[in-house]
Image (cartoon, rainbow, N blue to C red):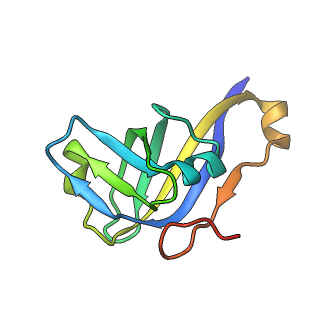
Amino acid sequence: MIIEILKSKIHRVKVTQAELNYVGSITIDQDLMDAAQIIANEKVQIVNNNNGERFETYVIKGERGTGIVCLNGAVARKVQVGDILIIMSFGSLPIEEARKYHPVLVFPDDNNRLLK
């Protein structure tokens, strides 16, 4: 049996921008993407801790070291600048491999920068 499990999570990042007039997606600082092993165009699930919204979109690579977390297109209506998000990616593994897998967890600081 193949099951879907948490692959990686960026925990408690702050929304820095919301751009309604864009094709759609979330732009994430490349440092955060690399740390979480999330790649451009990967599907992610996002939870907004401020209002309880939960949605899926795909990732666009943001400028490295900027701390950018920008919701683009229609999902911009589900956030406010300053909201706190949890960004999760998932993968599929055979159940026996999944039992041994440990997700990558990233806990950035209040400015969306990696803690050293």
**Is residue 113 positioned above or below 64 on the image?**
below
In the rendered structure, the answer to whether residue 62 lies left or right of residue 80 reads right
Give whichever of 56, 20 is nearer the camera: 20
Q: How many marks?
A: 0
Q: Position of residue 57 (x, y in %)?
A: 37, 39
Q: Position of residue 35 (x, y in %)?
A: 65, 51
- Which residue lies most toward the bottom here? 110
**Is residue 51 positioned above or below 86 on the image?**
below
Give whichever of 51, 16 is nearer the camera: 16
**Is residue 105 positioned above or below 30 on the image?**
below
Q: Quadrant of the C terminus?
A: bottom right
Give whichever of 18, 68 is nearer the camera: 68
- Which residue lies most toward the left here? 21
In the rendered structure, the answer to whether residue 101 lies left or right of residue 73 reads right
Q: What residue do we see at 55% from left, 36% from top?
A: 39
Q: Quadrant of the N terminus?
A: top right
In the rendered structure, the answer to whether residue 21 lies left or right of residue 110 reads left
Q: What residue do we see at 67% from left, 57% from top?
A: 105
**Is residue 42 positioned above or below 67 on the image?**
above
Image quadrant where residue 94 sits:
top right
Q: Position of residue 60 (x, y in %)?
A: 41, 39
Image quadrant where residue 83 sits:
bottom left
Q: What residue do we see at 25% from left, 66% from top?
A: 80
Q: What residue do we see at 56% from left, 47% from top?
A: 33
